[in-house]
Amino acid sequence: MTRDRDHDGVLHEAFAELRREDTAHAPSFDAVVQRTSGATTPVPLRGGALAAGMLAAALVVGLLVRRPALAPPPAAATLAWTAPTDFLLRTPGIEVLESVPHIAPRRSLLALDGAAAAMEPKRRSPSP
């Protein structure tokens, strides 16, 4: 437990005085209950008419004060836009990666047979 630091009772007396002053100025519980039970309830028709009038006024103001239609942004400006970091995608040798390799047409097998015979080394006669 904590020890009471108000040894002289000064704080205790000061708060007791505040409670006595508040009690003297506060109304009794019965008086508060009597005051609220005798109060008349507001007429719902008055509130509904006020809400309908506010709605009508807002509608009239909304129809009279129209904003001009905003023009759409030009399409050419958005189509020509490039990202500021596009240069990072251009790597050395990109031309090779973006092109299609050229492959020579196939030769017929008959042409290859004749080429192979022409390429055979001629036989030499044995040396003495």
Image (cartoon, rainbow, N blue to C red):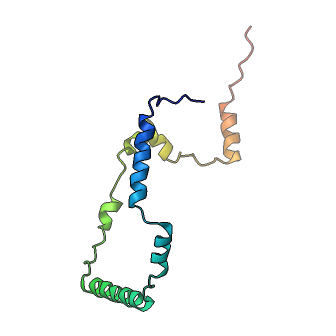
Residue 35 position in % (x across, y down): 45, 76
56 sits left or right of 109 in the view: left
Q: Quadrant of residue 3?
A: top right
85 sits left or right of 101 in the view: left
User: Residue drawn 24% across and 82% down?
Assistant: 65
User: Residue drawn 43% across and 50% down?
Assistant: 19
Q: 50 or 3, which lies in front? A: 3
Q: Is residue 119 visible?
A: yes
Q: 89 or 58, which lies in front? A: 58
Q: Is residue 116 above or below residue 105?
A: above
Q: Is residue 90 visible?
A: no
Residue 109 position in % (x across, y down): 70, 46
5 sits left or right of 58 in the view: right
User: Residue drawn 38% across and 53% down?
Assistant: 21
Q: Is residue 59 above or below residue 112?
A: below
User: Residue drawn 40% across and 48% down?
Assistant: 18
**Placement of the N terminus among the 4 image quadrants:** top right
